[in-house]
């Protein structure tokens, strides 16, 4: 069933992680029933928000992007999230040996995919690009994502809570470094002239 774990991750996360572990979902199935749909929320909402609604700078009218510019950015954003989930899952798989666990790659990718659920859902805020509102909603979503990671790692990787805490902290640190690197690459790309184009 498509998106069948979303509610459970918010209502009863520990029990839901155990259900996810029992499923032993393959990479393709995990992507087809969860990641492909949820990862589309932020770029689609962002596309609509930046082309149809826009944001206000000072007392002027709404600033919007051209359809072509927003479409290109949205597609790259979507692709980056799909690759990002796989990369974090691969990293978890590789790091597992250090923490005394060797789980199959699909389980590690599932851990990364389901952990990102709150961030995917928060992408709906892109429909109305107001910086303070996005920050207000995004901060709790980020906190809950971290919470899911710390709960999910010991269950999915079948290690003690103590080792799970250390493992989760390591994954979180690498994730933050990757985020900073991605932001730096974005700045370089935009500086090279491949960036958003404002509609006239």
Image (tube, rainbow, N blue to C red):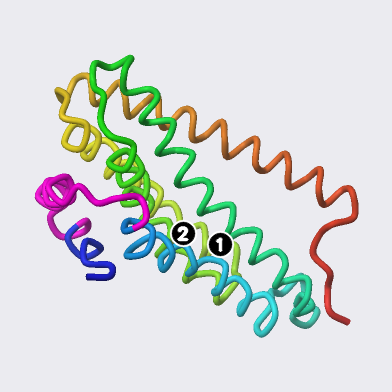
Q: Quadrant of the N terminus?
A: bottom left
Q: Is residue 37 above or below residue 156?
A: below
Q: Is residue 20 above or below residue 120?
A: above
Q: How many marks?
A: 2
Instruction: Work out whether residue 42 can be spotted.
Output: yes
Image location (x, y in percent) of residue 142? 41, 49
The residue singled out by tag 1 in the image is: 132
Secondary structure beneath disc 2? helix
Image location (x, y in percent) of residue 186? 73, 47
Image location (x, y in percent) of residue 13? 17, 51
Name the quadrant containing residue 194. Answer: bottom right
Image location (x, y in percent) of residue 47? 63, 74
Mark 2 surroundings: few (<14), some (14-19) or many (≥20) residues within 10 A = few
Mark 1 surroundings: few (<14), some (14-19) or many (≥20) residues within 10 A = few
Name the quadrant containing residue 137. Answer: bottom left
Q: Is residue 193 above or below residue 68?
A: above
Secondary structure beneath disc 1? helix
- Look at the image and give the residue range highlighted in magenta: 9-28
Residue at x 31% of width, y 52% of height: 114
Which numbered marker is on residue 136?
Answer: 2
Residue at x 17% of width, y 45% of height: 21
Instruction: Work out whether residue 63 can be spotted.
Output: no
Gap in angstroms between the C-alphas marked 1 and 2:
6 Å
The answer to which of 30 and 76 lies nearer the viewer is 30
Residue 41 located left or right of residue 28: right
The answer to which of 60 and 145 lies nearer the viewer is 145
Name the quadrant containing residue 5. Answer: bottom left
Residue 101 located left or right of residue 69: left
| Residue 171 lies in the magenta stretch | no
| Residue 27 lies in the magenta stretch | yes
Q: Are marks 1 and 2 in contact (CB under 8 Å)?
A: yes
The answer to which of 22 and 54 lies nearer the viewer is 22
């Amino acid at each position: 069933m498509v998106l069948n774990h979303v509610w459970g991750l918010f209502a009863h996360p520990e029990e839901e992680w155990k259900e996810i572990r029992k499923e032993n979902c393959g990479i393709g199935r995990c992507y087809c029933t969860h990641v492909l749909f949820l990862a589309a929320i932020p770029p689609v909402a962002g596309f609509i928000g930046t082309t149809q609604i826009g944001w206000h700078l000072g007392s002027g009218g709404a600033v919007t992007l051209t359809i072509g510019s927003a479409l290109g950015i949205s597609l790259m954003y979507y692709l980056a999230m799909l690759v990002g989930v796989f990369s974090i899952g691969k990293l978890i798989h590789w790091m597992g040996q250090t923490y005394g666990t060797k789980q199959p790659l699909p389980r590690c990718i599932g851990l990364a995919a389901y952990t990102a659920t709150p961030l995917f859902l928060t992408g709906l805020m892109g429909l109305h690009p107001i910086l303070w509102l996005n920050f207000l909603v995004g901060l709790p979503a980020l906190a809950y994502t971290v919470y899911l990671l710390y709960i999910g790692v010991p269950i999915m990787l079948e290690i003690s809570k103590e080792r799970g805490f250390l493992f989760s902290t390591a994954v979180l640190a690498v994730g933050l470094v990757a985020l900073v690197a991605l932001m730096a690459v974005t700045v370089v790309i935009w500086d090279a002239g491949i960036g958003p184009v404002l509609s006239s």
